[in-house]
């Protein structure tokens, strides 16, 4: 059988350290390794994009400030850039990561070039549905853009259900989970980082996020405060965001400043993760929990909250521990148990690593996306607009009688 032809793929994403940008970048790099031509469209260089990679192109969106605008219209600038890239490189499809505002911009771009049919795929990553996208200011336009996508994916069953509830979606949403490079994120020599992070030989608890309110950082500080009553430990905070000032105030209030490392954003985050003894993610909800998965791949046990996408990542009691949101006493108690029982901690870490390797390997999930693209491109058309210049594709066909 002859190999399938290479595709020309546009990827619209945020270039920041958040999960959606990380996954979009890793996906694009993986597709380029397989011979596809990948065009990233973003307002800056994605954090995990190397300076040069074969078959990878970066098109930066320029947003020009004008005195008339209180907030520069990024959505319009992004739309224009997508049209420009499509007209120059004849993209086979554009994959929009994070619905707000990317799905809207890609939809507008497709409407502007009906003479060059453009297939549009949108991947939902989390707060673009659970929080931002459902704000009354954005909900109708976000849901409309999803309706007008040729196909929609979500990173977990939890997020798929939320999208259906919030948008009343009558089209299928395919679940393709996030993934982790288990070669890069793997156990290894952590003596150097540990010597820096724990100069007194303390045990290390870590957290990685964009420090938004949904992460419940006060719960994390309280868990650490309780753990410190029993165990000589240090807390390593990786990332930054709007809740950081609040975290710093709480750390100072509890007299923990000497026991907390504020590491900020890190490109080689795996070097810090593999140095940890325990990872804690006490979020209100997680649509997937990529940070937890990356810690698991490094053989670090994870304590997290259940009831959302983390249930699909962590096997409770085997590859990590899940607790009700806000149950800081239980989280702290089990953290102390794991930190003081090295064999149990290592066993759970090994199970966590096994779970990451078995369920979320990079190669297999990139193949899922690749096959999904082929299906979308090969789908027969239907009678009403809008997926290409004439009509949508079967991956979002509504059930019989749905219109």
Image (spheres, rainbow, N blue to C red):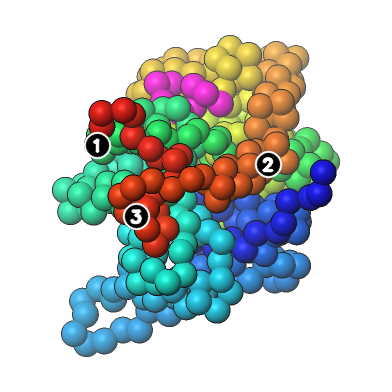
Closest to the observer: 228 or 59? 59
Label 2, on which residue?
A: 367
For disc 1, the neighbor class at 10 Å (few under 14, some 14 to 19, many from 20) is few
**Residue 330 visible in the current orientation:** yes
Label 1, on which residue?
A: 403
Q: Residue at x 45, y 39 (%)?
A: 395
For disc 3, the neighbor class at 10 Å (few under 14, some 14 to 19, many from 20) is many
Tell me where the magenta segment starts and ends, as one range.
306-313
Residue 386, labelled with which disc? 3
- Tell me whether circle 1 and circle 2 mark residues in contact (CB < 8 Å): no
Secondary structure category for the residue under label 1: loop
The tag earlier along the polypeptide, 1 or 2, is: 2
The tag earlier along the polypeptide, 1 or 3, is: 3
Secondary structure category for the residue under label 3: loop
**Residue 96 visible in the current orientation:** no
Q: Residue at x 79, y 50 (%)?
A: 3
Q: Is residue 342 above or below residue 136?
A: above
């Amino acid at each position: 059988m002859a190999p399938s032809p290479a595709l020309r793929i546009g990827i619209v994403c945020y270039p920041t350290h958040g999960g959606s940008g990380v996954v979009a970048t890793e996906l694009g790099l993986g597709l380029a390794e397989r011979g596809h031509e990948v065009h990233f469209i973003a307002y800056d260089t994605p954090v995990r994009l190397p300076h040069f990679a074969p078959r990878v192109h970066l098109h930066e969106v320029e947003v020009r400030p004008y005195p008339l605008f209180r907030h520069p219209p990024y959505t319009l600038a992004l739309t224009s850039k997508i049209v420009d890239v499509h007209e120059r490189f004849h993209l086979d499809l554009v994959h929009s990561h994070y619905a707000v505002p990317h799905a809207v911009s890609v939809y507008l771009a497709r409407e502007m070039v009906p003479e060059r049919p453009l297939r549009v795929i949108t991947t939902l990553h989390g707060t673009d549905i659970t929080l931002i996208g459902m704000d009354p200011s954005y909900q109708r336009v976000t849901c409309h853009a999803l309706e007008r996508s040729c196909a929609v994916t979500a990173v977990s069953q939890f997020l798929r259900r939320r999208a259906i509830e919030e948008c009343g979606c009558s089209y299928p949403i395919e679940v393709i989970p996030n993934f982790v490079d288990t070669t890069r994120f793997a156990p290894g020599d952590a003596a150097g980082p540990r010597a820096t992070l724990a100069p007194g030989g303390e045990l290390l608890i870590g957290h990685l996020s964009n420090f938004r309110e949904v992460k419940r950082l006060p719960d994390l500080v309280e868990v650490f405060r309780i753990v410190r009553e029993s165990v000589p430990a240090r807390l390593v905070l990786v990332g930054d965001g709007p809740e950081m000032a609040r975290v710093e105030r709480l750390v100072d209030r509890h007299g923990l400043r000497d026991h907390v490392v504020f590491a900020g954003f890190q490109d080689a985050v795996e070097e810090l993760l593999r140095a940890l003894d325990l990872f804690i993610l006490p979020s209100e909800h997680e649509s997937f929990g990529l940070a937890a998965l990356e810690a698991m791949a490094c053989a670090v046990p994870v304590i997290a909250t259940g009831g959302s996408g983390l249930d699909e990542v962590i096997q409770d009691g085997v590859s990590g521990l899940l607790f009700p949101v806000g149950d800081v006493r239980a989280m702290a108690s089990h953290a102390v148990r794991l930190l003081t029982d090295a064999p149990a901690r290592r066993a759970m870490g090994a199970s966590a690593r096994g779970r990451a390797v078995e369920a979320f390997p990079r190669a297999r999930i990139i193949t899922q996306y690749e096959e999904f693209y082929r299906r979308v491109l090969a789908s027969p058309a239907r009678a009403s607009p809008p997926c290409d210049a004439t009509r949508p594709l079967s991956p979002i066909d509504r059930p019989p009688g749905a219109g």
